[in-house]
Amino acid sequence: MKIAIIGATGFVGSALVNEFADRKHEITAIARTPKDTSNAKWVAADVYNADALAEILKGHDVVVNAFNPGWSNPNIYNDSMKGSKAIQEAVKKAGVKRFITIGGAGSLFVAPGLQAIDTPDFPKEIYDGANAARDYLNIIQEEKDLDWAFFSPAFEMHQGTKTGRTGKYRLGLENPVFNDEQRSILSVEDLAVVIADEVETPKHHQVRFTAGY
C-alpha cells in the first residue's frame, strides 16, 4: 500500500515510518525538515498549507497523521488546531478516503462523563496540547465524508516507556485499556504496530479507539 505519514520525524512518526517500512509498504514521509533515509520517500511540507499538502497526498491509499507542533511550543493549542484542521482539509482535497490521526489520551473517559484531562491530577504542563487533541476529536467526529479513525494512545506512552516492540496489545474505544496493575501502558513501537495493523486490516471506521497491554 502507499502510505503518507505526516509528522514523520517526530517521536510517534519515526516509529510509524520504521514499522511500515519493515512491512514493505511504499511510504511518503512528510515533515517540515525531512530526514534522508532509504526506507521512505521524504518530502518537506508546511502542514498549515492545505492546498500544497493536498498535492503531496494525492494518489495515496491511506494518510496517517502524527502531527504535533511540539510540547514546548507556547502556542501549542492554536497551532495544533490550525494544523489538524488543515491536514483534514488536505486529505479531502487530495481525494484520499482513509485517514488515521494520532491524538491524545486525555480525552479518554476514566468514569462516566469524566475525561482524564478534567481530573485534578492531570499534568498541567501538557494540558494545552491535550485539550487541543480533545477539541479536534470533537471536530473530526462530525466528519462524514472521510473514512477516518482517531487513535488515543495509552496514558503511559512516552519516551520513558521501555517495553519495546512486543507486537501484542488489547484494543478499546472510549476508555483506557488497563493491565492487571491498573496501568494504561503501550510503547511507541507497539503504537506503530497498532496503527499498521489498522491500516492493513481496518476495524475502526469514523470512531475513536485506543490500545494498551
Image: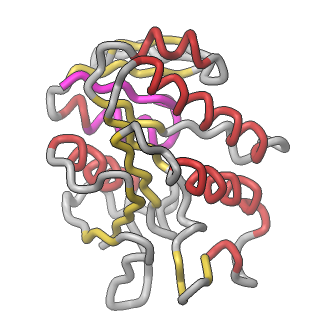
Q: Give left or right: position of 98 versus 138.
A: left
Q: Is residue 204 left or right of residue 12?
A: left
- Image: 127 above or below 3: below
Residue 8 vertical placement versus 175 (above, below): above
Q: Is residue 52 left or right of residue 128?
A: left
Residue at x 38%, y 44% (from the top left corner) = 148
Q: What's the image's color scheme?
A: secondary structure
Residue 67 at x, y percent in the picture:
55, 36
- Pinpoint residue 70: horizontal percent, then vertical percent: 68, 40
Taking depth in this image into account, of 31 and 205 the one nearest to the observer is 205
Q: Nearer the viewer, residue 161 or 155?
A: 155
Residue at the front extreme of this rendering? 144
Instruction: Give percent across and percent down for residue 76.
Output: 76, 44
User: In screen coordinates, is 94 left or right of 1?
Assistant: right
Residue 206, position in %: x, y?
37, 52
Indicate the quadrant where residue 164 lies.
bottom left
Q: Which residues are magenta?
A: 1-19
